[in-house]
Amino acid sequence: MDLKNGSVVTEFILLGFSGQREFHIFFFVTFFSTLHSPMYFLLGNLSFLDMCLSTVTTPKMITDLLSEHKTISVWGCMTQMFFMHLFGGAEMTLLIAMAFDRYVAICKPLHYRTIMSHRLLSGFMILSWTIGFVHTMSQMVLTVNLPFCGPNVIDNIFCDLPLVIQLACMDTYTMEFFVIADSGLLSLICFILLLVSYTVILITVQQRSSGGLNKALSTLSAHIIVVTLFFGPCIFIYAWPFNSFAGNKVLAVFYTIITPLLNPVIYTLRNQKMQGAMRKLWFQRVISTQKK
């Protein structure tokens, strides 16, 4: 291969939508304006947590599907459990913050910008990560010191706390109860708070305007679907007796992989602004094609 004048390529040029100026303006206005909205700020953080949660389990699961030796080190297992409960606990809290955002947007629309300030949003983020950290540390502090000297087979696609505890060479009844009290009750309490918040929103809207109920249901439908998909398997796994965990592989995949992947799709398809943006983009594309 000949190199002219000894030049070496150090960068590449991304054409993107070169020559289509209307696309530049359309995408810039659409995304720049929505990223400053409190709801989209929360959605961005939810997507980040979903991505992190999937990253904890998916690469290892894919590797194991192609390998005959499906092993993981003890500390690798501990790390996986630590981050799963960290991101999971943070996402539960964030979903409650998103429910509060919808309550303010639907029931107090005139005060939305004032109430959902940057200071409050930052507080929500700090609170969600703090609860996630406290939640995972409260369990991992005890788990890392457990003795493992006998069986070492985990009947699941990833390391999860209940199954790992069962492998310890000691009586784990107290630990099992603590896991149910910690993870199970946290999931159940957050789920109940979310149901209560959505019920309050619907009742408030119905009392003010009978015609606004359908609009409120349309607005909340994406949130209700995401909450059900996230908390359903989570509550079932952590609030069920320990001897049933061996049959929860499907729920485990659903909770850690499928649900985080579905969340962005659900919010995108149910969001009116995004639907309008996609329709405008489609019409502009059709018009530009016809002109050619």
Image (tube, rainbow, N blue to C red):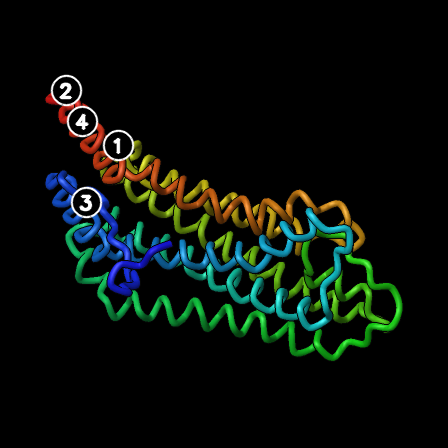
Disc 4 element: helix
- What residue do we see at 15% from left, 45% from top? 24
Work out how far the residue at label 4 is from the one at label 1, CA to CA, in angstroms.
Answer: 34 Å
Q: Which residue is mark 1?
A: 210
Left or right: 22 with respect to 173?
left
Instruction: For marks 4 and 1, give the one nearer the viewer.
Output: 4
Q: Amino acid at mark 3?
A: Phe
Task: Identify the image quadrant of residue 205.
Answer: top left
Please give the residue where the numbered disc 3 appears in the rendered image: 27
Q: CA distance from mark 1 to mark 3?
A: 36 Å
User: Looking at the picture, which amino acid does disc 1 mark?
Assistant: Ser
Distance Cα–Cα, label 2 vs label 1: 44 Å
Q: Give the Cα separation between the discs numbered 3 and 4.
A: 14 Å
Q: Nearer the viewer, mark 2 or mark 3?
A: 2
Residue under the image location 65 percent in, 78 percent down? 141
- Residue 282 spot, x, y in % from top left: 22, 29
Say which quadrant the N terminus sits in.
bottom left
Q: Which residue corresponds to mark 2?
A: 290
Secondary structure found at label 1: loop
Marks 2 and 4 close (CB-CB < 8 Å): no
Q: Residue at x 61, y 62 (%)?
A: 183
Q: Earlier in the sequence, mark 3 or mark 4?
A: 3
Disc number at residue 283?
4
